[in-house]
Image (cartoon, rainbow, N blue to C red):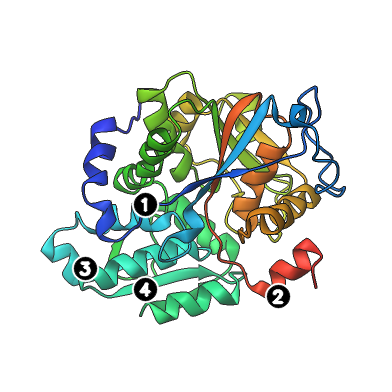
């Protein structure tokens, strides 16, 4: 049974702020009706906010990991993994595989550690992420989604050289991610539920480990787009599954093709359920966050916000982790209909 010790996350918190920052938790006011039901996200969410009863049953908070130096939570795990490498491993250089955010995290950590970095990048990665990776000094190796996912599954590639930093299936990376969970409990001790997008599961595994250890009554939800929901399928079947109906979408940082068998033991013990969201509701949630609190959320983060808005996380205080904000502004405008 694979487990991440809470002690490893506490230890990570002693070092993670050498690279990451402590991000804020902000309230997102929502027009819930008196029965606690969520609105239809395809409608105007700014309408009819006069009744206090609309906010009586649900409070939604945003954990703004989009404010990290690289615009994503990945800096937490990346730094915790890279900082623990031996001098000989650092001399080899490091590499990772990523849609963009883990690439930036590992590149940032490598530069801070004084080692070189290369990244196998999914060919659909947005220009914003590619430019950021290059600015951080990493070498980009482009690859198809299938090649990248095979690399994720096999933990290696004959095309790459150096020490491999897995973007999520690595205990040190997961422990670093978990430091966000410590911050959530510090800022909102009476939190009732936390929801975060699932790509590979490293964020949920880390934050979930903290919550299970220190606040076991908190509900923990994954959020997946309808085009890529392997965890929901896995939870239904009781085993790690491949999602054969996978399709690409603007949600490029979440929704893999499968749940890795090595991640399944962690996720099945931590996750309350996976909430699968339609793309139009994700887009509406992204617009709502921008309209109300001026937060630019990329597709994966929007999936978590949409799940929090859906009413399917239950009642009480719900935290949606805004896992990243790295999206081209022109693409964001197109997705949310603000062109």
First in sequence: mark 4 vs mark 1: 1
Q: For the residue labelled by badge 1, is the local secondary structure a helix, a strand or a loop?
A: loop
Determine the CA span between mark 4 and mark 2.
Answer: 27 Å
Which structural element holds mark 3?
helix
Left-right relation of 256 to 20: right
- Please name the residue shown 27% across and 75% down the image: 116
Tell me, yes or no, whether the two marked residues, 2 and 3, touch with CB atoms within 8 Å.
no
Secondary-structure class at tag 2:
helix
Q: Tell me the element at label 4.
A: strand
Q: Nearer the viewer, mark 4 or mark 1?
A: 1
Question: Disc 3 versus disc 4: distance between alpha carbons?
Answer: 14 Å
How many residues crowd around disc 2 within 10 Å: few (fewer than 14), some, or many (20 or more)?
Answer: few
Task: Answer with mark 2 or mark 3, whichever residue precedes in sequence.
Answer: 3
Pointer 2 residue:
330
Q: Earlier in the sequence, mark 3 or mark 1?
A: 1
Q: Position of residue 126 (x, y in %)?
A: 60, 72
Name the residue beneath numbered marker 4. Answer: 118
Q: Residue tagged by mark 3?
A: 113
- Checking the image for residue 22, the label placed there is 1
Q: Is residue 238 left or right of residue 201?
A: right
Label 4 packing within 10 angstroms: few (<14), some (14-19), many (20+): many
In the rendered image, which quarter contains the C terminus? bottom right
Mark 3 to mark 1 CA distance (whole Å): 20 Å
Residue 317 occupies quadrant = top right
Circle 1 crowding by C-alpha within 10 Å: few under 14, some 14–19, many from 20 = some
Q: Which residue is painted at 50% across and 69% down in the image? A: 121
Q: CA distance from mark 4 to mark 1?
A: 27 Å
| Residue 243 in view (yes/no) | no
């Amino acid at each position: 049974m694979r487990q991440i010790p809470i002690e490893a996350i506490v230890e990570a918190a002693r070092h993670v702020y050498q690279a990451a920052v402590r991000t804020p938790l902000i309230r997102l006011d929502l027009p819930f009706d008196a029965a606690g039901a969520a609105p239809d996200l395809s409608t105007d969410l700014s309408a009819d906010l006069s009744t206090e009863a609309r906010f009586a049953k649900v409070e939604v908070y945003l954990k703004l990991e989009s404010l990290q130096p690289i615009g994503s939570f990945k800096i937490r795990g990346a730094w915790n993994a890279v900082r623990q490498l031996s001098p000989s491993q650092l001399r080899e250089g490091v590499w990772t595989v990523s849609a963009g955010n883990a690439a930036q995290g590992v590149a940032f950590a490598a530069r801070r550690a004084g080692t070189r970095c290369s990244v196998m990048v999914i060919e659909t990665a947005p220009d914003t992420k590619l430019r950021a990776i290059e600015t951080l000094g990493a070498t980009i190796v482009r690859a198809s989604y299938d090649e990248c996912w095979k690399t994720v599954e096999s933990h290696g590639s004959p095309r790459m050289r150096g020490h491999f930093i897995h973007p999520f299936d690595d205990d040190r990376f997961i422990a670093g991610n978990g430091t966000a969970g410590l911050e959530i409990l510090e800022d909102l001790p009476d939190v009732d539920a936390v929801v975060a997008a699932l790509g590979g599961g490293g964020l949920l595994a880390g934050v979930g480990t903290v919550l299970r250890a220190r606040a076991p009554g908190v509900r923990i939800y994954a959020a997946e787009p309808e085009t890529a929901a392997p965890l929901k399928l896995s939870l239904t079947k009781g085993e790690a599954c491949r999602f054969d109906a996978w399709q690409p979408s603007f949600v490029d940082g979440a929704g893999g093709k499968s749940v890795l068998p090595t991640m399944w033991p962690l996720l099945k013990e931590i996750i309350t359920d996976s909430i699968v969201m339609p793309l139009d509701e994700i887009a509406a949630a992204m617009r709502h966050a921008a309209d109300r609190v001026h937060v630019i959320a990329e597709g994966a983060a929007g999936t978590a916000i949409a799940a929090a808005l859906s009413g399917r996380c239950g009642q009480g205080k719900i935290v949606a982790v805004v896992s990243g904000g790295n999206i081209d502004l022109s693409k964001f405008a197109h997705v949310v209909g603000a062109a």
